[in-house]
Image (cartoon, helix red, strand yellow):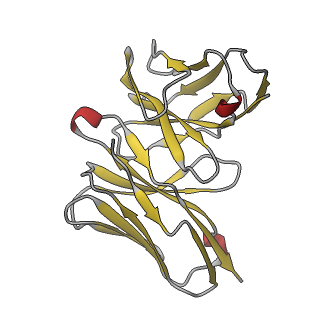
Amino acid sequence: NAGVTQTPKFQVLKTGQSMTLQCAQDMNHEYMSWYRQDPGMGLRLIHYSVGAGITDQGEVPNGYNVSRSTTEDFPLRLLSAAPSQTSVYFCASSYNRYGYTFGSGTRLTVV
Amino acid sequence: TQLLEQSPQFLSIQEGENLTVYCNSSSVFSSLQWYRQEPGEGPVLLVTVVTGGEVKKLKRLTFQFGDARKDSSLHITAAQPGDTGLYLCAGAGGGTSYGKLTFGQGTILTVHP
């Protein structure tokens, strides 16, 4: 039982490049979310999903896209990377919203 | 927008002392969750409180949910160096915010031997 798997663990991008952060869970959880964590800011919600085919925006969605074609996968796409998107990104999933399992994070640097 | 104010932001205490972390909001949440995060790792769930006035205990940690389900507290008795870490509260939304989990800013706890 792998839990929530995020890839890659580290990534350096140049300004303007695009990339996809991968998130997969093997617990058959309906609820999945993407967060970014910056120093002193806690975790801020980017996008979330309440099931396959259903996504919605969180607090800071600009510059990011998501899709949920399967229950297991919830990729996060950066359309045109900016230095302001340098952060640690966490994916999380939950069976019933009453407790989330988090991945180990992707550390992204945009130069 | 549902906001959670967590305080204090930093807490530095000696081993054996007691402490309380507060999490307050003007919004009602369907549940309030507490997480602990170690450096370089993702948050790990400690407890979820659902019912107004609910109190849960996890060894030396006591969690309380306010009667109106807008606030929560985490009390640690006789803190130990192993309690050092980032503590985060998070509120699960209802209604049009169904599926959202909103985090407070976090409390960095350091327990000195």
Closer-to-camera residue (A59/B64)? A59
**Quarter of the figure that contains the C terminus of chain A:** top right
**Left or right: B111 in relation to B28:** right
For the question of whether residue A1 can be seen, the reply is: no
**Left or right: A20 in relation to B48:** right
For the question of whether residue A55 can be seen, the reply is: yes
Question: At 33% from the left edge and 41% from the top edge, which residue is drawn?
Answer: B1
Give residue B11's position: percent from left, percent from top. 58, 74
Closer-to-camera residue (B71/B77)? B71
**Left or right: A50 in relation to B59:** left
Question: At 34% from the left edge and 34% from the top edge, which residue is drawn?
Answer: B99
Q: In the rendered view, would you say B59 is above or below B52? A: below
Choose top left, top right, bottom left or bottom right for residue A24.
Answer: top right
Q: In the rendered view, would you say B18 is above or below B97? A: below
Give residue B60's position: percent from left, percent from top. 48, 77
Q: In the rendered view, would you say B105 is above or below A11? A: below
**Quarter of the figure that contains the N terminus of chain A:** top right
Give residue B10's position: percent from left, percent from top. 59, 69
Figure disc tally: 0
Q: Which residue is situated farthest in the bottom direction here?
A: B16
Q: In the rendered view, would you say B105 is above or below A90? A: below
Closer-to-camera residue (B62/B89)? B89
Question: At 26% from the left edge and 51% from the top edge, which residue is drawn?
Answer: B27
Closer-to-camera residue (A95/A33)? A33
Give residue B75's position: percent from left, percent from top. 44, 75
Question: At 60% from the left edge and 46% from the top edge, which residue is drawn?
Answer: B42
